[in-house]
Image: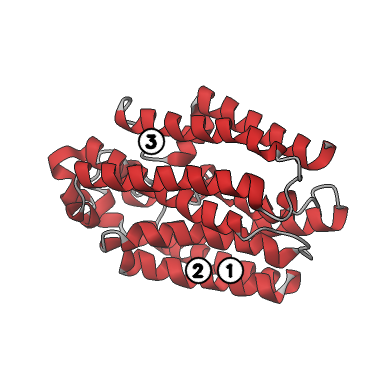
Amino acid sequence: MLIALIKTMRPRQWTKNVFVFAALVFDKQLFHADAFLRTLAGFALFCLISSSVYIFNDLSDVEADRQHPEKKNRPIASGKLPVNAAWAAGIVLVLVTCGLAFLLSPGFEYVIVTYFVLFMAYTKWLKHIPILDVLILAAGFVLRVHAGVTLIDVERFSPWLYVVMSLLSLFLGFGKRRAEIALLTHDAGSHRKVLEGYTLPLLDQYIMIVSGTTIVAYSLYTFSAPNVPENHSMMLTIPFVLYTIFRYLYLIQVENSGGSPEEVLLTDRPFQIAMVLWAATVLAIFYLS
C-alpha cells in the first residue's frame, strides 16, 4: 500500500516544482545559504501539496481512469490503493503542508493555499472547460515561480520571467492535449471530456502561437531585463531554448509522444542535454561573468 501511495503522489511530476528555484537563481542568490535552504524547504512543501492534488484528482477520476488505456493502471483505479487510505493521505498532506508553509513564510502559505484551492476547483470543474483547463495549468507554473519570490528577499527579479513562464507552460499544456488526442484518436472525448473541445488543427494553431511568442518573450528577457549582464551575454542561451522547443514539437508531432512533459524531461536524452547546457550557460553568465 505504501508503494501504491508513493506512486499516486507522482514523484516524477515533482520536477515541475523546480521552478520554485527560479527566483533564487535569477536573483543571483543561489550560493546564499539561508536563501537556498528556505527555497529548498519551499520546494519540498510544494511537492507535498501538489501530491495531495494528484491524490484528490485520481479519486475524482477513478471511474474514467479505469476506461483509459494507460491510466487504468494507476493505484487507485486498479484497486492497489484503497479509496479510504487515499482520502486520509490527501487530507494529512494538506494539513501538514499548510502548517509548515506558514512557519516558513506567510506569503508562501498564501501561494500554497491558492494553488491548492485553484487545482481542487480544476479537479472538480475547470478541467472540463476547453482553453481554460490549459490556462489553469499555466497558472500553476506561475504560482511556483511566485512561491520562490515569497521565500527570499528579492532584489532585482525580472517580471519578464513570469511572462516567459506563462507562455512556456501554455506551450506545454497545449502540447500535452495534442499528444492525448493523437494517442486516444476517436475515443479521446470518452476518456477526457475536455478533449471534445479540441481538434488537432486547432491545437496546432495554439501551439504555433505560444511557441513563437515564448521565443520572442525569452529573447526580450535576455537583453532587456534589469538583472541580466549589460554585455547581453544572456542571449547566448537563446539557441538552447530554441532547440528544446523544437525538440518538444518533434516529439509530439513525429514521435507521437509528449503527453507527459515530465516524462520527456526524465527520458529524452537530447532534451536533457539541451536543458543541462542551458542551465550551465545561465549559471556561468550570472555567477562567473
Disc 2 packing (10 Å; few <14; some 14–19; many ≥20) = many
Q: Which residue is mark 3?
A: 258
Q: Residue at x 77, y 35 (%)?
A: 284
User: Marks 3 and 1, Cα distance to the nearest angstrom?
Assistant: 28 Å
| Residue 196 picture location, percent across and down | 17, 53
Can you tell which mark lies on residue 116?
A: 2
- Examine the rendering and report whether any part of residue 136 can be seen: yes
Disc 1 packing (10 Å; few <14; some 14–19; many ≥20) = many
| Amino acid residing under circle 1 | Ile
Looking at this view, name the residue that lies furthest to the left. Answer: 186
Q: 257 or 236, which lies in front? A: 236
| Residue 64 picture location, percent across and down | 24, 53
| Helix, strand or loop for disc 3 | loop
In the picture, residue 56 is in which quadrant? bottom left
| Helix, strand or loop for disc 2 | helix
Q: Earlier in the sequence, mark 3 or mark 2?
A: 2
Say left or right for 123 vs 276: left
